[in-house]
Image: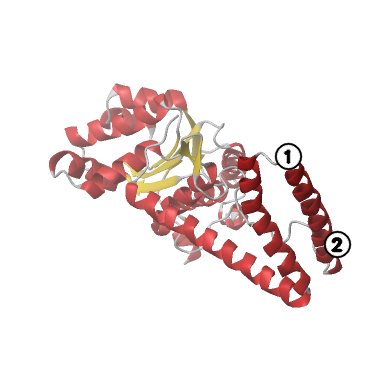
């Protein structure tokens, strides 16, 4: 699967990669200054080794085989002495070498003519910054998903206690994050105030921490972006839509709260179907039952959700009321 990159976010990712290169260069300068101060002979050796490079080119062009052999012998002696001096400082022989954070592209951000994985991770980090609305408390983790807020006895008409059901829901969500992107997409279904958005945030934080790109928005906002892209030729809306379609994980919150219009139907179908076709994972949360969804959405949308998403039923009493 190829990924469509948002130019602004990619530029910010490249800026971050450039900062990393500068930090690495500064650290190398610091190490060099420290080593030269403690072992001045190292400076002379390095200067001679650099001079040998120019001399080697000249001798190669002249075809002086004997001189090249002597130069190589001198170089070997110098490098051995250099290693001894560094070991005296308690350092490895490569301590003064160029420092790179990515051995694959050597911090260029380019690999095999495309974007290197290191730059992709930085891009995903920039993309994940947009999760500020979802990850607002900084507390979103599976460990903080409080099962004690769910009754440990069955509610009237229910065979299983809410806590038991939610324990299984939490386990599936943890497994989804652990196995991502191999797990099936999820449908978080249940009433208001049962923890759907919070658990989505827990998954988002865990998946983003693994270096994957994550997008979050409400159904109404998603449809608004599609409308702006189509009717106003808004570049920022176009970028948002591309992110939603191509990110590794899309979280579509509050499905069913948007205005039911032909545009909304088209936008939701495009988002859901495109991501399924391209095998990109999605988490949808909704207060609607399957019967309510069938009345509101086309058979195409409903069949894709029912057939391709794993259902996580949220049950219990409104957590917000319990906390009060």
Give the camera-side residue of 261 and 57. 57
Q: Position of residue 122 (x, y in %)?
A: 49, 51
Q: Residue at x 30, y 46 (%)?
A: 240
Q: Where is 78 relative to 118, above or below?
A: below
Q: Residue at x 48, y 64 (%)?
A: 137
Q: Where is 225 relative to 183, above or below?
A: below
Q: Is residue 292 visible?
A: no
Q: Is residue 77 visible?
A: yes
Q: Residue at x 23, y 31 (%)?
A: 266
Q: In the image as oriented, which residue stretches furthest toward the left?
A: 231
Q: Which residue is mark 1?
A: 65
- Image quarter (top left, top right, bottom left or bottom right) of the N terminus: top left
Label 1 vs 2, first from the N-terminus: 1
Q: Is residue 133 left or right of residue 58?
A: left
Give the camera-side residue of 306 and 247. 247
Q: Is residue 188 left or right of residue 241?
A: right
Q: Quadrant of residue 31?
A: bottom right
Q: Is residue 282 left or right of residue 236?
A: right
Q: Which mark is residue 76?
A: none
Q: Secondary structure at mark 1?
A: helix
Q: Quadrant of residue 305?
A: top left
Q: Secondary structure at mark 2?
A: helix
Q: Position of residue 265 (x, y in %)?
A: 24, 32
Q: Which residue is mark 2?
A: 84
Q: Where is 199 relative to 85, above or below?
A: above
Q: Residues within 10 Å of mark 2 (few under 14, many from 20)?
A: some
Mark 1 vs mark 2, CA separation in Å = 29 Å
Q: Residues within 10 Å of mark 1 (few under 14, many from 20)?
A: few
Q: Is residue 189 left or right of residue 28?
A: left
């Amino acid at each position: 699967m190829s990924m469509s990159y948002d130019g602004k976010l990619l530029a910010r990712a490249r800026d971050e990669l450039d900062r990393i290169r500068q930090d690495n260069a500064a650290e190398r300068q610091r190490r060099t200054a420290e080593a030269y101060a403690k072992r001045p002979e190292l400076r002379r050796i390095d200067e001679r080794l650099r001079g040998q490079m120019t001399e080697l080119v000249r001798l190669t062009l002249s075809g002086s085989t004997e001189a090249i052999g002597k130069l190589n012998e001198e170089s070997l002696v110098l490098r051995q002495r250099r290693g001894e001096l560094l070991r005296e400082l308690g350092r490895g022989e490569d301590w003064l070498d160029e420092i790179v954070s990515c051995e694959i592209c050597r911090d260029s951000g380019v690999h095999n003519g495309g974007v290197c994985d290191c730059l992709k991770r930085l891009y995903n980090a920039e993309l994940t910054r947009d999760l500020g609305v979802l990850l607002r408390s900084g507390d979103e983790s599976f460990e903080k998903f409080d099962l004690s807020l769910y009754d440990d006895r069955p509610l009237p008409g229910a065979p299983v206690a809410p806590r038991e059901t939610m324990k299984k829901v939490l386990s599936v969500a943890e497994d989804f994050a652990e196995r991502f992107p191999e797990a099936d997409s999820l449908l978080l279904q249940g009433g208001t105030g049962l923890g759907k958005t919070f658990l989505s945030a827990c998954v988002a934080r865990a998946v983003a921490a693994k270096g994957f790109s994550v997008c979050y928005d409400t159904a109404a906002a998603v449809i608004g972006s599609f409308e702006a892209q189509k009717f106003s030729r808004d570049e920022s809306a176009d970028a948002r839509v591309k992110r939603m379609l191509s990110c590794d994980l899309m979280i579509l919150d509050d499905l069913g709260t948007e205005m039911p219009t032909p545009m909304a139907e088209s936008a939701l179908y495009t988002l859901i179907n495109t991501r399924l076709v391209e095998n990109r994972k999605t988490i949808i949360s909704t207060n609607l039952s399957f019967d309510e969804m069938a009345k509101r959405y086309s058979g195409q949308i409903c069949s894709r959700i029912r057939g391709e998403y794993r259902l996580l039923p949220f049950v219990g009493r409104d957590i917000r009321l319990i906390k009060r």
